[in-house]
Image: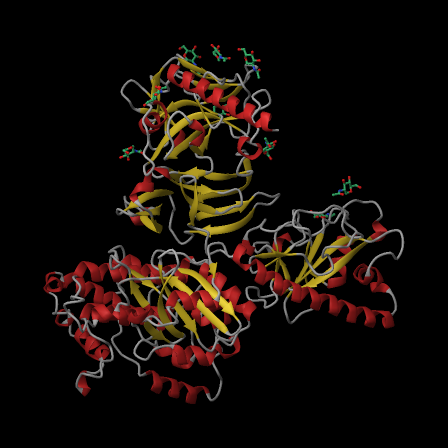
Amino acid sequence: MAIWTTLKAVMQFLIILFLAFFVAAQTPTAQVSTPTSWTNNISLPSVSYSRIILSDGNASAALFENKTISSESMVRGSVCAFYPVDYLKDDQFDPDSARFFLVVALLETSGYNFPDLSNYGLSNIWSANRNKPVRENATLQLLVDGNLELRDADGSLVWSTNTSNKSVAGMKMMDTGNLVLHDTNNNIVWQSFDHPTDTLVPGQKLVRGQKLVSSVSEYNISEGNFYLSVTSHGLLGFYQANVPQMYLKFFDHVWNLESIELKYSGSEDIALYVNAPEFGALGSPWLSASVSVRSRPGLFLKFESNGHLILHDGSMTVAHNMLTSHIPECDYPTICNDYEFCSNGMCLCPPGLAQGEPELAQGESESGCPAINATTCENLEYHSLLTYQNVYHFSYIDDGAAALKGTDIESCKKECLKNCSCKVALFRHDYNSLLGDCFLPSPVLTLIYDEYRRRYYKSSYAFIKTLNNKENGRGSSRSKIVAGSTIGAFFLVGLAIGFWFVFLRNKREEEEYMEDNFDKLSGMLMRFTYQELIVATGDFKEKLGEGGFGSVFEGTLQKGDKIAVKRLDSIGQGKKEFLAEVETIGSIHHVNLVRLIGFCAEKVHRLLVYEFMCNGSLDKWIFSKEPLLRPPLNWEIRMTIVLNIAKGLAYLHEECRQRIVHLDIKPQNILLDEELRAKISDFGLCKLIDRDQSQVVTTMRGTPGYLAPELFSSVITEKADVYSFGIVVMEVVCGRKNMDRSQPEECMHLLPIFMRKAEEDQLVDMVDRSNQDMQFHYSEAVQMMKVAIWCLQSDYKRRPSMSDVVKALEGNLDVEAYLDYTIHNPIKVAAARREAEQGTATPILPSLLSGPR
Ligand SMILES: *[C@@H]1O[C@H](CO)[C@@H](O)[C@H](O)[C@H]1NC(C)=O
Ligand SMILES: *[C@@H]1O[C@H](CO)[C@@H](O)[C@H](O)[C@H]1NC(C)=O
Ligand SMILES: *[C@@H]1O[C@H](CO)[C@@H](O)[C@H](O)[C@H]1NC(C)=O
Ligand SMILES: *[C@@H]1O[C@H](CO)[C@@H](O)[C@H](O)[C@H]1NC(C)=O
Ligand SMILES: *[C@@H]1O[C@H](CO)[C@@H](O)[C@H](O)[C@H]1NC(C)=O
Ligand SMILES: *[C@@H]1O[C@H](CO)[C@@H](O)[C@H](O)[C@H]1NC(C)=O
Ligand SMILES: *[C@@H]1O[C@H](CO)[C@@H](O)[C@H](O)[C@H]1NC(C)=O
Ligand SMILES: *[C@@H]1O[C@H](CO)[C@@H](O)[C@H](O)[C@H]1NC(C)=O
Ligand SMILES: *[C@@H]1O[C@H](CO)[C@@H](O)[C@H](O)[C@H]1NC(C)=O
């Protein structure tokens, strides 16, 4: 054994030496001219079994100039290379059987010295021959006529740029990751950027008609089942099936979407820009993430094999789930294995199909939930169906896809039993009717178990086909339930009780399972013990503030990172619900929303751990009582803060698939980071309150002075946030509180004064005088006040959406011309309405209540 290890080490050393020799012998350049050819053999310099063809300046310096790279520095560059399939997975490389893709990849290294090239990492960003890997001895030729051809070892043409006679003079590896064929004037004739695979890098556009197609897996970069397509109706994500199943939809409100593009915005942000005529030449940044300048060369946005869109920083696993973070996991079409139910992002084996049922299991699937093999046409008499309520098929199934319409539950079951290829049938009906639609999905995508029916308007049953034990009654009680369902009524009662126990047991197991698996499944959320948080906060010593939901304390993690810990009181909710809501909040990421880092749910304790915002809340700045510590803000900072809040709210209202209404927007809930950029805190918290009390509680929870008038009559829409936002903008520009009890009676309320000035066209009087810079920008300030007045319309239907507010603030949309300056006294209005309606309560629309469902 020891000898073998030594031998292996010696071999490795020899290989490295050998490589070093060839590296020295054949140094790739960033640029070649026609004609040139490369053979995919060991003569090419190799990095992690990839053979390098071209490398840009930085990559060449790192690889071939024998520079000792200091341990702090990270070098990143682009290379074009033959990249072997599966080498990472197997860790066994056999050139005789290996298959290669021709790729462009980002190369990175840190702290390792030449010539140990095995320490360099490669991340694919493009491939020429995704679906047709080539062998050892394949050739890439840049021909005299300008065509770039990839031929396999047997000489067959695999791929070509089709650029014969297009006066190509040479080929270049650009440091952006673009592989370019150019003419004698250096004009681009062909570029890999025009043929995207599954990745976008900064500077690369995905234009209408183009799509990103996911890879089969991390290692097999052939085309997989998901694609993301730019259409004039938006950016749409599909799962490829007989009928493509849409599961993502973005920017569908944008007129004539032309392209999307990953671009830097500002010094530390990268954003997905949306280009459409309405946004002008620069486009509009949609979703942005903060990144350090250092990681810039290694950033890329990848459409992953599981259908997520992730921003990568080189090979680092730390990644931002840019577009798709707020989509509930269960809305991904292939999140779970066959027959598993997805519930709150977790995959569960349906009761009755649980482990340890040899009669049902005909081959175990990975998770241990047995695969069922009842899709043959043999032994039809042994096929039967297990019934589950509140199970829905992956969301986008449309009524037109129904196998039977206006049918009853028994006919639906029969339809599946008589069809050999039916694995699962779904029956969906309105609550007030026994008749409904029957679906036989193929393929069977995610089955969502949603016991609270939070997101669906219809009731749904799923029937899963199973194969009964043919031989005898050897089966356990559970399979007997399935088999015995046609036997006498007396027996049925017993069975019902049995099933009930089974179900209860499974429910309990499920809860335990959820607990145990929460850390794993919640992605980036950390779970803390109560003790850990006592230590982190020094037994809740440093109180940062107090809100409607509990108190916030400053804390420090062991690593030294500062945190803000919110201790929630009176949460009328079970642990399971709490975890589910926390997971939802934790999955919401936006630069203008305070990030949830983790949580604690132990006994009665419910705590949320947030990123620490060193400049505290906005009220401390705009109503500053310590001008030396917190000087009055200048125009630009105020403008940025207002825009930040607007973008954060627009995200909550419109971009989150599960719309969230904040219901408590006020300066105390706007936090500022070290650069005085604003982030909204406390979003999603209304959901933590007992659902049955939500009507009362939401009305009680809001803050006087910021409450929209219609809330008093229980009309709750996201426009309530727009109103509160209007108040905040007014306060920011005027530099004083809406309700200031320190002022004389007649000036106590700012809003009436503000509206009167607006009506008199004298808003300029209202601009904050404590900072001279504000006076220099008075016309812009007045413009912003007009946006505020638009948001403060008494009739909530006349208020703009938050995305319109963002456009108006950015000068891309005019403020509504006819503004209403009247103020409704909410208490009086509510009383009047109650009288008029004589007890006809306005029902709260469930979909609009305080957030995601
Ligand atoms: C690699 O291919 C080139 C071009 O065909 C050839 O000249 C060279 O000998 C080959 N090297 C090896 C090690 O097979
Ligand atoms: C790289 O540099 C080291 C010393 O700095 C030297 O010993 C080594 O031979 C060089 N290798 C090559 C391939 O030039
Ligand atoms: C590649 O070509 C060389 C000769 O150039 C040959 O010896 C070798 O067997 C070939 N390898 C494969 C895998 O075909
Ligand atoms: C080149 O032409 C072939 C045949 O027309 C086509 O299949 C292939 O996609 C083209 N290659 C590129 C890079 O456009
Ligand atoms: C390129 O030009 C040559 C000579 O003009 C012609 O024979 C050949 O067919 C052309 N090839 C293509 C692909 O157009
Ligand atoms: C190349 O390296 C230099 C120096 O480290 C760096 O400033 C530059 O941004 C790098 N360029 C790219 C494209 O990585
Ligand atoms: C990669 O996936 C494709 C499509 O599923 C498959 O045909 C091919 O065999 C796979 N390649 C490898 C090396 O597994
Ligand atoms: C299912 O049954 C068919 C036909 O009997 C068989 O070919 C197939 O291998 C079985 N699949 C599993 C997973 O057992
Ligand atoms: C049988 O079921 C499959 C789905 O499993 C469906 O696509 C097909 O249309 C059904 N056939 C008939 C005749 O209903």
Q: Relative to 778, is 702 above or below? A: below
Camera-side residue of 151 and 585 = 585
Quarter of the view holding residue 56? top left
Q: Is residue 54 visible?
A: yes
Residue 784's x, y, as percent? 22, 64
Camera-side residue of 606 and 184 = 606
Residue 372 is left or right of residue 89, and the answer is right
Q: Relative to 633, is 551 above or below? A: below
Camera-side residue of 141 and 40 = 40
Quarter of the view holding residue 391? bottom right
Q: Residue at x 40, y 39 (%)?
A: 314
Residue 513 is left or right of residue 567, and the answer is right
Residue 364's x, y, as percent? 71, 47
Residue 172's x, y, as percent? 34, 23
Q: Relative to 653, is 544 above or below? A: below
Determine the residue located farthest toward the front in the rendered image: 2
Q: Quadrant of the N terminus?
A: top right
Determine the residue located farthest toward the right in the rendered image: 472
Q: How many marks?
A: 0
Camera-side residue of 850 and 20 = 20
Residue 107's x, y, as percent? 40, 32
Residue 722 is left or right of residue 370, and the answer is left
**Colour mode of the rendering:** secondary structure
Q: Is residue 853 visible?
A: no
